[in-house]
Amino acid sequence: MRIIEDHIEEHIGRISLVYHEIVSDELHIDIHVVEPSETRKFYTLITSGMSDYPMQAPKGYEDYKYAELILSLPATWSLTDEALQHQINNWPITWLKTIARLPHDKNTWVSLGHTIPNGNPPMPFSTKTALCCWVLSVPLLFGKSFRNLTVDEQKTINFFCLIPIYREEMAFKLQKGAQPLIEKLLRNRINEVIDVSRKNVCKKLFGLF
């Protein structure tokens, strides 16, 4: 964890808070919080612990066996203990932990372009948004040098950002592929800073599935 903390503070900023997992099995997931600053006016949340064990990456993707996750929240997002008792505030943190555990619980892997829905059919993450799925992308706001952390000759940790998406955007990805969706999101200046009421970039292209 110290190596990951040093990497975060070198590339993003000082860690002001760590949400330690109180009850866990062999896999212990913590979430590190970097507060808004003059240059980055948003919170940034990064996992550690997901990379303690390798994922079951398929042959040819061995360089992607180790990963951690990152997302960002507007400076107005309430992260007080009281606020985080409510689902409208805590769902990004809950999902960071859920997706960090997913490949180890299900003996699989997650990587660039993978999508995770909130149920089948996907349901909104909270009553305050229609966002209901995730797509994994490279981190977009912190420079290329943040994206990979070489621990030793056998282990490189890849950092992937989580971008919440709408059902129509998920349908577009399933038909057209992840790269066209991510390119469409980028053209609309959508990144890992969550905007619960942002534009749906595929609403006119796809109906609900």
Image: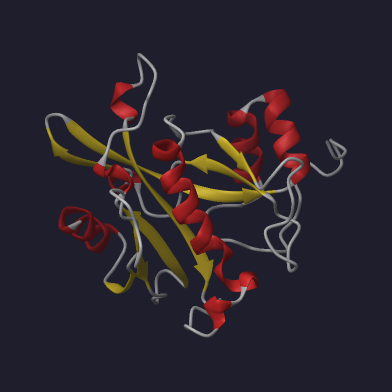
Horizontal placement of 150 versus 177: left or right?
left
Which residue occupies 16% across, 58% down?
2
Which residue occupies 29% across, 51% down?
49
Residue 76 visible within the image: no
The answer to which image quadrant residue 150 occupies is top left
Name the foreground residue: 1 vs 199. 1
Quick check: 182 above or below 49?
A: above
Name the foreground residue: 203 vs 122. 122
In the displayed image of the protein, which residue is found farthest to the top?
59
Horizontal placement of 55 versus 154: left or right?
right
Quick check: 72 above or below 58?
A: below
The answer to which image quadrant residue 114 occupies is top right
Residue 106 position, x and y percent, is 46, 34
Horizontal placement of 208 versus 151: left or right?
right
Residue 4 position, x and y percent, is 22, 54
Residue 134 position, x and y percent, is 60, 46
Which residue occupies 73% across, 68% down?
128
Name the foreground residue: 70 vs 132. 132
Quick check: 107 above or below 89?
A: above
In the displayed image of the protein, which residue is found farthest to the left?
152
Which residue occupies 36% across, 14% down?
59
Residue 194 position, x and y percent, is 58, 61
